[in-house]
Amino acid sequence: MDLVLNVADYYFFTPYVYPASWNEDDPYRQFISLLMVTNLGAVIIYLLFGGLSYYFMFDHSLMKHPQFLENQVRREIVYSLKSMPWMSIPTVGLFFAEVRGYSRLYDNIDSSPYGWFGVFLSMFSFLFFTDMCIYWIHRFLHHKLIYKNVHKPHHVWKVTTPFASHAFHPLDGFLQSLPYHIYPFIFPLHKITYLGLYVFVNIWTVSIHDGDYRVPKALESIINGAAHHTDHHLYFDYNFGQYFTLWDKIGGSYRNPSALEGNGPHDLCRKLEKEKSDNAKKIN
């Protein structure tokens, strides 16, 4: 995050915002700057990729599903934008620790224990580590003592749009993002790789809420895509994973997606539309 902060300081904060007497390395200034950058970045990523997915990937026929709520898209966006500033506070605390040098993030490939191989290895280990952690955090959030006040707001959306991707209670959103932020405190990770992965996980989160169930046939039982996550929203106790189905299979919570068996939300919408058409023909 120090790379982003350096760019923001050079082009914006130093020339236009802060007095010249306030040093860029001052911890109070860094924390305030990180708070602004994190909130602005989160909103841009959410609205940009959520909007692109909504207009180009999301099947709008799903809005005719009986469990699609009135004014749902607007409600998803409003809830997300209200939650993000609160989610960002503990997140910025972790970013601040990174900027102050307490993580294992590094600048140069030479600093990697295994060179370029270590960079590529860290990408895969990041995905598997975070997938494992999020699985168990997600299951914990479904515990009856936790669910109602923390995770239930996200399950209001039974048939989701891409804008539901960040519509979490602030504590819920932070807990599910925590593995991404603690990884570089445990394992070495290149700073550019970390930024790339941070953007990727946000795009992925959008994609598993977009109702586009296309995955290569050979990967359908491996990748936890939109079809799997749709069943999580519809049936509650299944498919808690983020990227892969591995931990759902280990934890006994795997469900083969209903959409891939011909009885998903799209199929119901088509069935209802056909019944409506048939009834109209009978009346005529």
Image: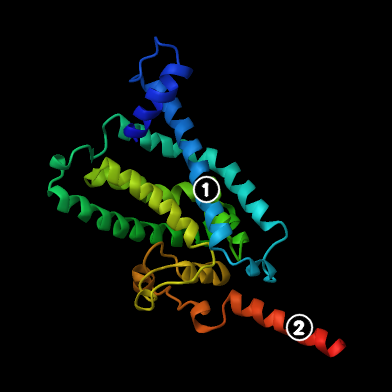
Q: Is residue 186 left or right of residue 143?
A: left
Q: Can residue 151 be seen in this view?
A: no
Q: Indicate the secondary structure of the residue bearing disc 1.
A: helix
Numbered disc total: 2
Q: In this view, does 128 lie above or below 170?
A: below
Tell me which residue sits at (39%, 52%) in the image: 200
Q: Is residue 125 visible?
A: yes
CB within 8 Å, label 2 to label 1: no
Tell me which residue sits at (50%, 36%) in the image: 40
Mark 1 nearby-residue class (10 Å; few <14, some 14–19, many ≥20): few
Residue 197 pos. (x, y %) = 34, 50
Identify residue type, mark 1. Answer: Leu
Identify residue type, mark 2. Answer: Ser
Residue 266 pos. (x, y %) = 60, 75
What residue would you read off at disc 1? Answer: 48
Residue 67 pos. (x, y %) = 67, 68
Q: Which mark is residue 206?
A: none
Mark 2 nearby-residue class (10 Å; few <14, some 14–19, many ≥20): few
The quarter of the rendered structure image containing the C terminus is: bottom right
Is 183 or 68 nearer to us in this picture? 68
Residue 222 pos. (x, y %) = 35, 72
Q: Is residue 179 above or below residue 131?
A: above
Is 57 or 126 nearer to us in this picture? 57
What residue would you read off at disc 2? Answer: 277
Q: Is residue 190 left or right of residue 210?
A: left
Q: Is residue 218 left or right of residue 269?
A: left
Q: In this view, does 88 lie to the left or right of 148?
A: left
Q: Is residue 284 above or below residue 96?
A: below
The quarter of the rendered structure image containing the N terminus is: top left
| Mark nearer the N terminus (2 vs 1) | 1
Tell me which residue sits at (56%, 63%) in the image: 58
